[in-house]
Amino acid sequence: MNQSVFGRIRLGYIVIGSTRLDDWRRFGAEALGLHVDLPSGDLLAFRVDDWQRRIIVRQAADEDVIALGWQVDDEASLERLQARLRARGIETRGTTGKEAALRGVERFVAFTGPKRQTHELFTRPIRTDRPLAMLTSGFVTGASGLGHAAITSRRPEAMIGFWQDVFDARVSDHIDARIDGIGLDITFLRLNERHHSLAVAATRGLRMDPIRTKLQHFNLEVSSLNDLTNAYVRCRELGYRVALGVGQHTNDRELSFYVVTPSGFEIEIGWNPIRVTDEANWAPTTHKGISIWGHTPQDLSFGSKAQQFGRALASLGRPEFNPTANAGDGR
């Protein structure tokens, strides 16, 4: 019997903690073109399809992504994942009621993963037939999930190993890149036919982490080229900082741009990435540079680069948490 959960899990929702809810409402609705609901004064809920909630922004001081929700196809696969986590000494916490409703799911199981990122596993989202009111014509979700998340790590081998061992992640490919003068090795992991649901980036040589937030960016895939260009124009006209202009990636061929959110991490808006539909014949390779063309840095000031450099140096004195490390390891 095949015990693999590959193809049975996908990114479902994202929970953000921020004190800047008014900024997030404007950013999500007017710049990105998402449907926005206001369930309460301390909560925003964005929709992109028939799920009740896909991106949740709750009142909190984090200014960060505080949880990633992963949809699992069935209870048997969920139980298998929990057993794998427990076998590695990782505590799982089942939750229903108000916290589950906040996420738009019936129940979820939470655990702390690498870099102390909270991950939540669930099987049944709450759906709605209420029409969408958004500026974007549509987003691509379905069996490949909401999009992908990109994480920087000082312990990439441990992080990649965690996702391969617990979630049966497969390596799609690698990128050897140089961004803002920093050499990066990036590994792209897929959990289903989406080219990658997770990207893990590490500085080459001396392992540093210049990113304040747990996620460097997450990705949303729009339905059309017009959706991409219109979102880019809106972000520029509304004054949001664009980190990287429109360009095309070397590995998944996605056309995209990166915009800085009110909380400081980035969102990539992309269109038309390739899918890995022929598992038997897919072979990982290494690409030189993140882009075939474009992705030119735009609204990055000298001050922001200096802050990144300072954070990179400071990270050398902080161990990075690995949930599978031995007790007392401190990491």
Image (cartoon, rainbow, N blue to C red):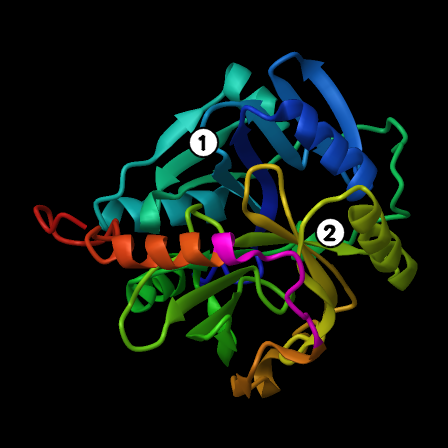
Badge 2 is on which residue? 141
Q: Is residue 124 above or below residue 267?
A: above
List the single residue furthest toward the top.
Answer: 41
Q: Is residue 276 above or below residue 285?
A: above
What residue lies at 59% left-to-right and 76% top-to-bottom? Answer: 290
Q: Nearer the viewer, mark 2 or mark 1?
A: 1
Tell me, for residue 103, which label it has, or none: none
Badge 1 is on which residue? 62
List the single residue furthest toward the left.
Answer: 328
The stretch in magenta equals 294-304
What residue lies at 71% left-to-right and 45% top-to-bottom? Answer: 240
Q: Is residue 94 left or right of residue 217?
A: left
Q: Amino acid at mark 1?
A: Asp
Residue 310, image quadrant: bottom left
Q: Amino acid at mark 2?
A: Thr
- Helix, strand or loop at label 1? It is loop
Q: Main secondary structure of the magenta part?
A: loop
Q: Is residue 136 left or right of residue 65?
A: right
Image coordinates of residue 149 in percent, x first then y, are 55, 54
